[in-house]
Image (cartoon, grey):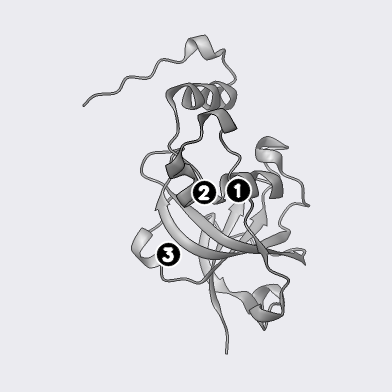
Amino acid sequence: METSCIVVLTARGTDRILSEGGSQAWRLNQKNASRYPYCVCVQNRNNGHWGGADKEHHHAFIVGRIKEVVPSQETSGRYKVVFSEYAEINHPNAWKGHRNPVRYGTLDEFGVTDPTALTWNPMPPCTAKPSSQKTEDDEKDGCGPLTISEAKAGLALGLRVPVTSIEITVKF
């Protein structure tokens, strides 16, 4: 029997996915995506090394067991697929030119006919935030909320401008 999965084409590499507790920031239907047991990450090298890309382009490299699908702390209106554990796989040429970076498929497409045969590893503690900024709530879900300074730093990096050029307004 084939096992369903979400497949994402990601510029993030293994270390970044593990440090963030899963794969993000995806435009998908949270309710539908939450029904899937697994997520396969396929490397996208079109952005060079942004996100710590460390595999060959279109190479499937991680299967994550989905714990939950939550709103992304990185991009409003997008979602993070949180992993409870992960297994490394080695499946080249795994992306067949699909336009959308999120699709639904089966593990069989990646040579995984029996997910229990994979070597599963627990997700490491979230390191996306410095330890000094972590709270008790962070330990519960793997990562805590994004701070204004983290958002500014991330935007500055992505837009290639100084942090001093970023202004964020919050309305309550």
* Mark 3 and mark 1: Cα distance apart in space: 23 Å
List the residue tagged with mark 1: 125
| Position of 145 relative to 3 (above/below) | above
Contact between labelled residues 3 and 2, with CB atoms less than 8 Å apart: no
Question: Which residue appears at 74% of the width and 63% of the height?
Answer: 93
Q: Residues within 10 Å of mark 3 (few under 14, many from 20)?
A: some
The residue pinned by badge 2 equals 142
Q: N-terminal of the two: label 3 or label 1?
A: 3
Element class at badge 2: loop
The answer to whether residue 11 is seen in the rendering is: no
- At x 68%, y 68%, the residue is 120
- For the residues labelled 3 and 1, say whether their Cβ atoms are less than 8 Å apart: no
Where is residue 86? Give x, y as percent.
Answer: 64, 63
Residue that mark 3 sits on: 33
Disc 1 crowd, CA 10 A, few/some/many (<14, 14-19, 20+): some
Say few, some or many: other residues with alpha carbon within 10 Å of mark 2 (under 14 / 14 to 19 / 20 or more).
many
Kind of residue indicated by mark 3: Ala
Residue 134 image point, x, y percent: 51, 35
Q: Is residue 68 left or right of residue 97?
A: left
Quadrant the C terminus occupies: top left
| Camera-side mark, 3 or 1 | 1
- Can you see residue 132? yes
Q: Is label 3 in a helix, a strand or a loop?
A: helix
Between the residue at mark 2 and the residue at mark 1, the CA separation in whole angstroms equals: 6 Å
Q: Nearer the viewer, mark 2 or mark 3?
A: 2
Return the residue nearer the eye: 65 or 106: 65
Q: Are marks 2 and 1 in contact (CB under 8 Å)?
A: yes
Question: Residue 90 appears in which quarter of the rendering?
Answer: bottom right
Q: Amino acid at mark 2?
A: Gly
